[in-house]
Amino acid sequence: MIEAVLFWGLAAAAVASALGVVALQNPVGSVMALLAAMLATAGLYALMGAVVVALFQLIVYIGAVLVLFLFVVMLLDLKASAAPARAAASGAAGVGITAAAGWAAWVAASHAPPAGSPRPAPGVFELAFDLFGRHLLVFELTSVLLLAAAVGAIFISRTGKRRSS
Amino acid sequence: MSLEHVVGLGIVLFAVGAAGFFIRSNALVLLLCVELMLNAVNLILVGFSRYLHGTEGQVFVFMIMTVAAAEAAVGLAILVALYRLLRTLDMSRINLLKG
């Protein structure tokens, strides 16, 4: 009962703030709405027993990625965009793409074996065992990806003045 | 709260993000919409991990979070470079590749 109340409350908060990301004209407002959506999603993760994922959501997404977005908004001094929104018909294209992808997810969900006796969600131990055991190579390769992204970001955003000297 | 509920919520969030990606004209909001879509997919993966009692879904979520962080870093660097070049982030005025 309490689980259902929490789920529907967090789901409503997530959808409302997601709509805020799209609807708010000020970029700072959009970032703040995305922050609310991330918080609601972190609550949903914790509700589903994925506590580690919820903590990573708080630390990585809200603590790093969204702060980076806020830095760029402040840095570029973006005004509330007076530019008219693009045609709403193209938004229908987005919904159409989602319908195709969502149909696949729905089929996968309906083919899932029915939930039997309620077992506990995989805990921190199982997750760590899997991540540093079977998926160790992938885990290590993500560090290469992060290094490449960091070097690439520095390379792209540097000014061209130093190159001429 | 069943698997269908979680998948349905993920689909709705993804639809909002995808529609926003096509509607909005601010390049920074476009990146925010991409993050929103990644978040929706993460939610569905955690839902499957919960109801199929596997850890793979959560491992996938870690990888997606890493890719999202890298994507945000590179994407924002591109935005800063674009803003230096064009003094705007309006997608209708970024048409350097138009023949």
Image (spheres, grey):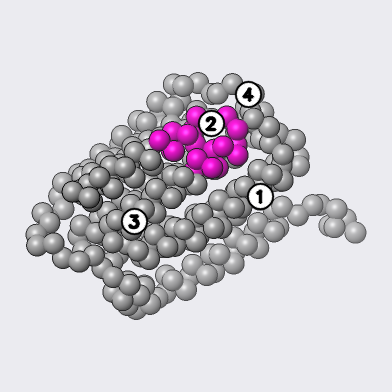
Q: Position of residue A143 (x, y in %)?
A: 52, 70
Specify the amino acid type for callout 2: Leu
For image coordinates 84% across by 57% down, the residue present is A163
Circle 3 residue: A45
Specify the amino acid type for callout 1: Phe
Specify the amino acid type for callout 3: Tyr
Q: Position of residue A17 (x, y in %)?
A: 44, 38
Q: Are marks 4 and 3 in contact (CB under 8 Å)?
A: no
| Between marks 2 and 4 in the image, the one whose residue lies nearer the viewer | 2
Magenta stretch: dominant secondary structure: helix
Tell me the distance, in whole angstroms, between the alpha carbons under discs 2 and 4: 13 Å
Q: Nearer the viewer, residue A160 or A84?
A: A84
State the mark number for residue A24: 2
Task: Give the left or right position of residue B27, taking residue B81 as reference.
Answer: left
Mark 2 neighbour class, 10 Å CA radius: few under 14, some 14 to 19, many 20 or more: some
On whether residue A24 falls in the magenta region, the answer is yes
Pointer 3 chain: A
Circle 4 residue: A83
Pointer 2 chain: A
Circle 1 residue: A71
Q: In the rendered structure, which segment of residues is drawn in magenta?
A: A16-34
Mark 4 neighbour class, 10 Å CA radius: few under 14, some 14 to 19, many 20 or more: few
Q: Are marks 2 and 1 in contact (CB under 8 Å)?
A: no
Q: Are marks 1 and 3 in contact (CB under 8 Å)?
A: no
Q: Secondary structure at mark 4?
A: loop
**Would you place residue A162 above or below residue A97 in this image?**
below
Tell me the distance, in whole angstroms, between the alpha carbons under discs 2 and 1: 18 Å
Q: Secondary structure at mark 3?
A: helix
